């Protein structure tokens, strides 16, 4: 799926959504940073943006990660997030499914929708 890039310009304040921890980094001219495409929140004008294939067919199918990473090239400021909303939703659905399976093994004991134990959470 190709990335969707929107440009924001003008005077005033812009609000952006991001999940987890947001990190900003100043890239020097020519400095390159290779990141997960889901991690990119924003970057200033002047930052080069390119998508690079990672690995081969086997990596894409069996590696559990995406097939592409994003290469950002300075100069400029970039903003990265540690947890995209898509990843958060996947983690919550997986944790809820694991809880249901565990409750079924215990004969239905448990509170539906209750908190997930720390040992059941994916890290």
Image (cartoon, rainbow, N blue to C red):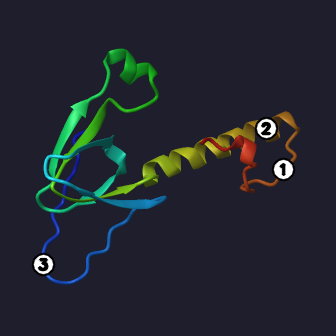
Q: Earlier in the sequence, mark 2 or mark 1?
A: 2
- Residue 58: where, in percent of width, then height? 38, 15
Q: Earlier in the sequence, mark 3 or mark 1?
A: 3
Above or below for 59 versus 65: above
- Residue 109: where, in percent of width, then height? 87, 46
Residue depicted at x 74% and y 36%: 101
- Residue 110: where, in percent of width, then height? 84, 50
Q: Distance between the residues labelled 3 and 1?
A: 53 Å
Q: Answer whether labels 3 and 2 touch (C-beta < 8 Å).
A: no
The front one of 21 and 106 is 21
Q: Mark 1 points at which residue?
A: 110
Bin the neighbour count of mark 3 within 10 Å (Cα to Cα): few under 14, some 14-19, many 20 and up: few
Q: Which mark is residue 10?
A: 3
Q: Name the residue under label 2.
A: 102
Q: How many marks?
A: 3
Secondary structure beneath label 2: helix
Q: In which quarter of the image is residue 122?
A: top right
Residue depicted at x 76% and y 49%: 117
Bin the neighbour count of mark 1 within 10 Å (Cα to Cα): few under 14, some 14-19, many 20 and up: few
Instruction: Name the mark nearer the viewer: 3 or 2.
Output: 3
Q: Which of marks 3 and 2 is nearer the N terminus?
A: 3
Q: Quadrant of the N terminus?
A: top left
Q: Quadrant of residue 32?
A: top left
The front one of 98 and 73 is 73
């Amino acid at each position: 799926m190709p990335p969707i890039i929107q440009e924001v310009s003008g005077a005033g304040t812009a609000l952006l959504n991001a999940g987890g921890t947001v990190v900003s980094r100043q890239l020097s001219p020519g400095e390159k940073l290779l990141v997960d495409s889901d991690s990119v929140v924003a970057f200033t004008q002047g930052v080069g943006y390119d998508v690079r294939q990672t690995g081969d067919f086997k990596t894409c199918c069996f590696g559990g990660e995406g097939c592409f990473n994003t290469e950002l090239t300075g100069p400029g400021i970039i903003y990265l997030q540690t947890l995209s909303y898509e990843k958060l939703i996947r983690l919550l659905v997986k944790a809820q499914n694991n809880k249901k399976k565990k409750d079924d093994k215990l004969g239905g004991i448990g509170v539906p929708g209750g908190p997930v134990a720390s040992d059941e959470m994916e890290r």
